[in-house]
Image: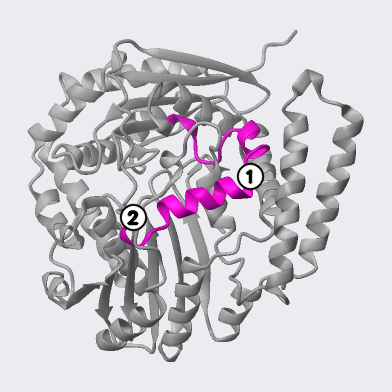
């Protein structure tokens, strides 16, 4: 399973950064004619509200799919942070028909596990009044209940069936904005896919829930609590977002992970995993009419329920710079976060261009200025939309100071470079044209693969409300002007609009 990916100076922050469905988007004069693809995409919606997008590509006898659920960590509430991520781990645990030797007996055992956990949690919640002896007894009973339920589990049954039939890349990913599930299959296994994916979405069994919850806790320990850079990013998000749930992080608070229940997970599933809150895109060697027939047969059991409302909380405008400092025996770092608009804001494309020109690659302004010229850093860059795109987010700047250089000195050097950008050295047309060329190339590479195109179609349908917006990105990127990028820089790159997070070497005591 994966959550997301981003690497800074070789440090994986995999549980912190959500890779969006759109890669900065763009388009252009691509081989084969990009415009013609829009006319080849066909869609239909089942009576329960589940939307399917289909693009037939018959070059090779395989197809890819992407199930996109409009529910991520941003949709969690206090006390159950981390619950969205659990469905990445629960994705392929099976159904009443797959993954068990005796589901009726297993169901009774799972109920015993839930009761045992409830009893243990109730005693723990007494805190200073809790009976330690009673806690140990309840822990033993909880462990025994899990072992009993485990006797009915056929481990990895769901994945094994698919892999034996040629499935490739079986995976799931959780982000702040959404959760996705995907793999490739030979085209003659289309009905097998429909049967298993439809059953998985309509009738999931959250078996081995607490076992996987412990895996998530271990992930949090390794990738955040034991990682100075992971802790720094987590603290930065919590500081930059004082009201919006983007500040809660992707993995969840440890105390929530240690206390939420399988019943709470099932409630989250019932609320968010409804047909109208999903899109499924298939791309490859498939027949549209056959997909329609199989969808009606196998996906109609997904609940027809209202779409859950979006997050109402709005992050208030930041009025003053925020700074946080961590000390650790680790590589010093300096991160900066500037508030920026969401994916559907008309200014968004200008911010993508700004982040790219500012800090993408070794010819960017930041790398050239801080690494090559000032020599105060060994790594520097920036990207837009951390941690998500559905709601107003942040433009993120990262730097790794050169040996012997204080992180604050790097921040000062960065400020001088930004000052130059805003005054004597504004963005040039040549820089903007270079960004557009890179964006078109990245975008074209993404949609070349069946999986990439499926991901893009599903993303645009759920994130913007219409998959056709995918094919408008060419014009939107090409329409960005130098003055739009400079306006974004003036609006966002202000000290009062930013959060600075610094990691220093621990002082000798």
Q: Secondary structure at mark 2?
A: loop
The residue at the far top in this view is 509
Find out whether residue 274 is within the magenta segment.
yes
Question: Residue 21 shows which numbered tag?
Answer: 2
**Residue 198 at what x, y percent from top left?**
45, 74
Local crowd at mark 2 within 10 Å, few (<14), some, or many (≥20)?
A: many
For marks 2 and 1 on the same chain, the one whose residue lies earlier in the sequence: 2
Q: Which residues are magenta?
A: 247-276
Residue in the foreground of this view, choosing between 509 and 167 = 167
Q: Residue at x 19, y 48 (%)?
A: 434
Q: Quarter holding the N terminus?
A: bottom right
Alpha-carbon span between mark 2 and mark 1: 30 Å
Q: Main secondary structure of the magenta part?
A: helix
Residue in the foreground of this view, choosing between 278 and 18 = 278
Residue 421 in view (yes/no) = no
Residue 74 in view (yes/no) = yes
Q: Quarter holding the C terminus?
A: top right
- Which of the 4 quarters of the picture holds residue 325? top right
9 shown above or below 492: below
**Residue 32 at what x, y percent from top left?**
17, 77
**Residue 273 at what x, y percent from top left?**
42, 57
Local crowd at mark 1 within 10 Å, few (<14), some, or many (≥20)?
A: many
**Residue 218 at what x, y percent from top left?**
70, 44
Q: Are dots 2 and 1 in contact, CB under 8 Å?
A: no
Q: Secondary structure at mark 1?
A: loop
Q: Residue at x 52, y 68 (%)?
A: 203
Q: Which residue is mark 1?
A: 261
Q: Is residue 406 left or right of residue 128?
A: left
Q: Residue at x 40, y 88 (%)?
A: 187
- Which of the 4 quarters of the picture holds residue 294? bottom left
Q: Is residue 3 left or right of residue 19?
A: right
Q: Is residue 175 left or right of residue 432?
A: right
């Amino acid at each position: 399973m994966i959550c997301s990916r981003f690497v800074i100076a070789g440090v994986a922050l995999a549980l912190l950064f959500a890779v969006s469905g759109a890669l900065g988007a763009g388009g252009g004069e691509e081989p084969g004619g990009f415009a013609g693809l829009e006319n080849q995409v066909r869609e239909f919606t089942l009576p329960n509200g589940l939307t399917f997008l289909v693009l037939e590509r018959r070059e090779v006898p395989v197809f890819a799919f992407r199930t996109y659920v409009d529910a991520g960590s941003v949709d969690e509430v206090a006390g159950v942070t981390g619950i969205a991520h659990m469905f990445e781990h629960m994705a392929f645990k099976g159904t009443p028909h797959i993954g068990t030797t005796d589901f009726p007996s297993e169901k009774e055992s799972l109920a015993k596990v839930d009761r045992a956990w409830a009893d243990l949690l109730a005693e723990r919640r007494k805190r200073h009044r809790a009976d330690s002896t009673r806690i140990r007894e309840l822990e033993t009973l909880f462990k025994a209940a899990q072992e009993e339920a485990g006797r009915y589990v056929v481990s990895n049954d769901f994945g094994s069936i698919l892999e034996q039939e040629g499935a490739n890349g079986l995976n799931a990913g959780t982000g702040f904005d959404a959760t996705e599930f995907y793999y490739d299959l030979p085209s003659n296994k289309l009905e097998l896919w429909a049967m298993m994916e439809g059953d998985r979405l309509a009738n999931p069994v959250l078996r081995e829930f607490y076992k996987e919850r412990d895996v998530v806790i271990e992930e949090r320990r390794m990738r955040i609590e034991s990682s100075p850079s992971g802790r720094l990013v987590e603290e930065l998000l919590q500081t930059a977002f004082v009201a919006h749930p983007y500040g809660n992080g992707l993995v969840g608070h440890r105390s929530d992970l240690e206390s939420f229940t399988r019943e709470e997970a099932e409630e989250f599933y019932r609320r968010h995993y409804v047909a109208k809150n999903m899109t499924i895109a298939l791309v490859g060697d498939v027949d549209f009419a056959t997909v329609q027939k199989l969808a009606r047969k196998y996906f109609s059991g997904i609940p027809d329920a209202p779409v859950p409302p979006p997050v109402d909380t709005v992050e208030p405008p930041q009025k003053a710079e925020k700074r946080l400092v961590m000390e650790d025996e680790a590589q010093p770092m300096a991160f900066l976060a500037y508030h920026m608009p969401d994916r559907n804001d008309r200014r968004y494309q200008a911010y993508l261009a700004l982040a790219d020109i500012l800090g993408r690659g070794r010819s960017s302004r930041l790398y050239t200025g801080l690494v090559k010229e000032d020599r105060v850093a060994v790594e520097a860059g920036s990207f837009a939309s951390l941690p998500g795109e559905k709601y107003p987010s942040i433009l993120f700047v990262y730097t790794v100071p050169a040996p012997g250089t204080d992180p604050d000195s790097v921040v000062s050097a960065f400020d001088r470079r930004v000052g130059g950008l805003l005054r004597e050295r504004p963005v040039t047309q040549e820089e903007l044209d270079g960004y557009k060329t890179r964006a078109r190339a990245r975008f074209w590479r993404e949609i070349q693969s069946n999986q990439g195109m499926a991901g893009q179609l599903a993303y645009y349908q759920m994130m913007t409300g219409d998959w056709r917006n995918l094919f408008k990105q060419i014009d939107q990127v090409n329409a960005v002007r130098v003055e739009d990028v400079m306006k974004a820089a003036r609006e966002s790159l202000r000290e009062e609009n930013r959060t600075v997070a610094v990691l220093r070497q621990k002082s000798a005591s």
